[in-house]
């Protein structure tokens, strides 16, 4: 109220339709901290690299908004993000972009990538994500390879969803889990529990 700056914008489920162009006025709201564009229809357009200009963002929700194509590496410029939701879009996340996210988003607590295609991202790279992470959703992402067992021991992780990744392998440790971990979904994956005996 003192500055007149817009710091929060909730346009979720607002029947927005069409392409969100890089010169859209939303990208001139440089003081935005929270932006919700979920449940709209952006007509299969790409996520604009201009999102990377919103450096004050702590929460970005693009869930189910009909975006498509590559996740732009500029998203990794948003180093203050605590919550990022790109779920339920026709998106592809390449290893380079994922590694930049892991390296730069050091304050991230919630990461939702349900149904984002990322078959080339190595499961071992999940260990590079912020140590503050409490919720990680990677359901139906086409993940392949072996999941490191110590992902279950991350000290702050409360919720982990890896269901629907049929080529994801590894072992769920029967003990020495994080005390914080309260929800795990490994359904339709090849990650199995170790026999305690």
Image: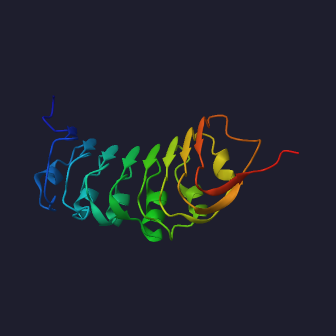
Which residue is painted at 15% across and 50% down in the image? 26
Task: Give the camera-side residue of 72 and 18.
Answer: 18
* 89 horizontally vs 194: left or right: left
Which residue is painted at 32% across and 57% down in the image? 89
Residue furthest right as drawn: 197
Colour scheme in the image? Answer: rainbow
- Residue 114 shows up from this direction: yes
Task: Give the camera-side residue of 129 and 139.
Answer: 139
- Residue 81 shows up from this direction: no
> Which quarter of the rendered picture does the N terminus lie within?
top left
> Which quarter of the rendered picture does the C terminus lie within?
top right
* Total numbered circles: 0
Q: Is residue 78 above or below residue 2?
A: below
* 65 horizontally vs 76: left or right: left
Which residue is painted at 14% across and 48% down in the image? 16
Residue 40 spot, x, y in % from top left:
21, 48
Which residue is painted at 47% across and 69% down in the image? 95
Q: Is residue 106 above or below residue 9?
A: below
Residue 184 spot, x, y in % from top left:
59, 42
Residue furthest front as drawn: 188
Task: Give the camera-side residue of 132 and 118.
Answer: 118
* Quarter of image, res 47: bottom left
Residue 158 spot, x, y in % from top left:
57, 38
* Quarter of image, res 126: bottom right
* 47 horizontally vs 29: left or right: right
């Amino acid at each position: 109220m003192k500055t007149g700056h817009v710091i929060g914008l909730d346009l979720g489920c607002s029947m927005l339709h069409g392409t969100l162009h890089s010169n859209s006025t939303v990208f001139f709201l440089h003081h935005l901290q929270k932006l919700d564009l979920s449940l709209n229809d952006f007509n299969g357009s790409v996520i604009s690299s201009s999102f990377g200009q919103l450096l004050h963002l702590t929460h970005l929700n693009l869930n189910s908004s009909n975006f498509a194509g590559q996740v732009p590496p500029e998203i990794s410029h948003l180093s203050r993000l605590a919550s990022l939701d790109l779920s339920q879009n026709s998106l592809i996340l390449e290893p380079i972009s994922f590694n930049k996210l892991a390296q730069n988003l050091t304050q991230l607590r919630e990461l939702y990538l349900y149904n984002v295609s990322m078959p080339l991202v190595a499961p071992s790279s999940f260990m590079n994500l912020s140590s503050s992470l409490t919720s990680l959703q990677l359901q139906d992402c086409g993940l392949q390879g072996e999941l490191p067992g110590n992902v279950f021991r991350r000290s702050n992780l409360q919720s982990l969803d890896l269901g629907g990744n049929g080529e994801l392998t590894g072992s769920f440790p029967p003990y020495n889990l994080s005390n914080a971990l309260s929800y795990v979904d490994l359904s339709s994956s090849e990650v199995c529990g170790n026999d305690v005996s």
